[in-house]
Structure formats: C-alpha cells, structure tokens
Image (cartoon, rainbow, N blue to C red):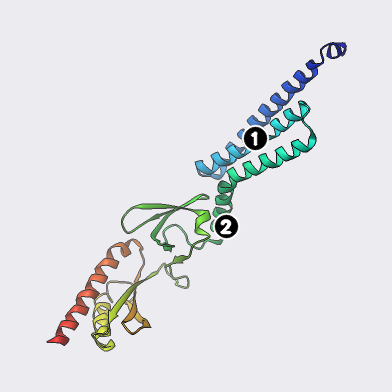
Amino acid sequence: MFEIFAEIPYLMTIVWLIIIIIVALTLERIITRQLKRFIKKTEMPPDVGNGLILTARLLILLGAVIALLHLGGVPSDILVSFSALGGAAVGFASNRTLGNIVAGIYLLIARPFRVGDYVRIDSVEGIVKEISINYVKIRTPARTVVSISTQRILDKEVTNYRIMSSETKLYRYGIELNFDHSLPAEKIETALDGVAERYAEVLPRKPTYEMTKLTRLERNYIFYIYVEDPEDLFELQPKILREITEAWEKVKNEAQT
C-alpha cells in the first residue's frame, strides 16, 4: 500500500491537502454553530455576532493557509512572517468589533446610565432608549434616534441628569442662561423667581437657580427644573426658556420706562 506513495511522490501531498481542507471545513462548521448558539443565548446584536463569526472564520482560514504553505515546502521563517502579518490583519479587522464588545460589557457592568435616563454624551442629549453591547440609542429632543458606539462613549464626557441620591426617580436638568449688565442681579433674579413660582405646584420640586459665572460682559445662570418623567423635558425646556426670556424682557422694559 505504501509503495503507491513511493511511486507517486505527490500522492502524499494530495492526501495531506485533502486532510487540511476537511479539518478546516469541519472546524469552521463546528465553531460557527457554537458561536450562533452563544449569540442567540446572550441576545447579542446581529452586527456584533456577525463580527465574531467573521473573526473566527478568518483565523481558521489563516491557519489553513499556513498549513498549506508548510505542506508546499515554504521555509519556516517565511511562515512565521506570514502568520504574523495575517494575525495583524485579522486583529485590525476585528479590532472595532472586539473593542465595542469590551466597551459594551463595561457599560453594562458600570451602569453610568440605564434605559430611560436623560443623558448628554458629548454633544448629543436625550433619553436612552436601548443599551446593547455594540451601540447605545438615544432619542433626542428633535424626536430622532442617534446610535453611538459603546467604544466611542468611553472616550466622551457623559452626563446623567438623574439624581442618584433621590429616593424616587427624579431628574434635574439645567438650562444655561446669559444676561448682560443692563439690569442689576436683583431684577434678573426677580424674573427667575416669578417663573420658578409658576412651576412650583406643577413639577415634583420647585425649580431653583444659581449664578455660575460673572464676567465683564454678562452674568451666567443655570435654571434647574425637576421632573420624574424625562419625556417632560422635551416640552418643558423650550417652554420655560421662552417664559424666562419674556419675563426678562418685561423687567427690562419696565426699568427703561
């Protein structure tokens, strides 16, 4: 039987070629099947799951190619260089997916915010509608949904407007206000007091304010409103801002007459 391999030198190479292909295909099917079960069990987002499957297939393909090159008599130093290059390519291709997975797991464990919270992530603010391993979806005041990758969130400043020490679910949202020096602080705060009193019985807590900065050109205030349902902020923020503007203009006109 073994005399056949001696008479046909390339027959052994063909046999090993077939074995490598069969092993690679078998591994690909087994690993893909197991990954699909894991993805379904953990309810992993489709894009993340597809990224994991693609990474596994690339690794199997890389191993099969290296085995074939070795079978073809390629020197070991070239194989090492090729495997390093292939590993770097696979790592680069899967870096974003794996980075998002790690970042998503961190967010799920650390929980800087949860679904339903009103947050600001960099320049995007709104209500968190979904948290997955790969993305966080936020519904903005413009009623649009913005998806932010979890890896990007770790590099951005995150503000959660939920009051952590509150016994009940309460959010405090600050409206930034800038006034020039045409009116004294007493007149400005009278206007702010009027708006705060108007909402004292409407909101779960009476609005408050504080001066945050004083410059040569203007006074900066933050007017805080408190809500239990963050959806209310979509309507209250522009409404209260308009009422503050009207109250300030009224006081200013009275001072000029």
> How far is disc 1 from disc 2 in space, using C-alphas?
26 Å
Judged left or right of residue 62, residue 54 is left
Judged left or right of residue 78, residue 201 is left
Identified at 77% across, 30% down, the residue is 74
The quarter of the displayed image where residue 34 is located:
top right
- Above or below 152: residue 78: above
Q: Residues within 10 Å of mark 1 (few under 14, many from 20)?
A: some
Q: Secondary structure at mark 1?
A: helix
Q: How far across and down, in percent of the image, does residue 80 sit?
A: 75, 39
Q: Secondary structure at mark 2?
A: helix
Q: How far across and down, in percent of the image, does residue 61 sit?
A: 66, 32
- Above or below 29: residue 84: below
- Above or below 214: residue 48: above
Identified at 54% across, 39% down, the residue is 50
The quarter of the displayed image where residue 143 is located:
bottom left
The three-letter code of the residue at mark 2 reads Tyr
Q: Which mark is residue 31?
A: 1
Q: Residues within 10 Å of mark 2 (few under 14, many from 20)?
A: some
**Which residue occupies the extreme left position in the image?**
257
The three-letter code of the residue at mark 1 reads Ile
Toward the viewer: 124 or 205? 124
Question: If the image is split into quadrants, where does the C terminus sit?
Answer: bottom left
Q: Earlier in the sequence, mark 1 or mark 2?
A: 1
Judged left or right of residue 28, residue 73 is right
Judged left or right of residue 172, residue 60 is right
Q: Which mark is residue 235?
A: none
Q: How far across and down, in percent of the image, does residue 148 sit?
A: 45, 53
Q: Which mark is residue 106?
A: 2
Q: How far across and down, in percent of the image, does residue 45 sit?
A: 50, 44
The quarter of the displayed image where residue 220 is located:
bottom left
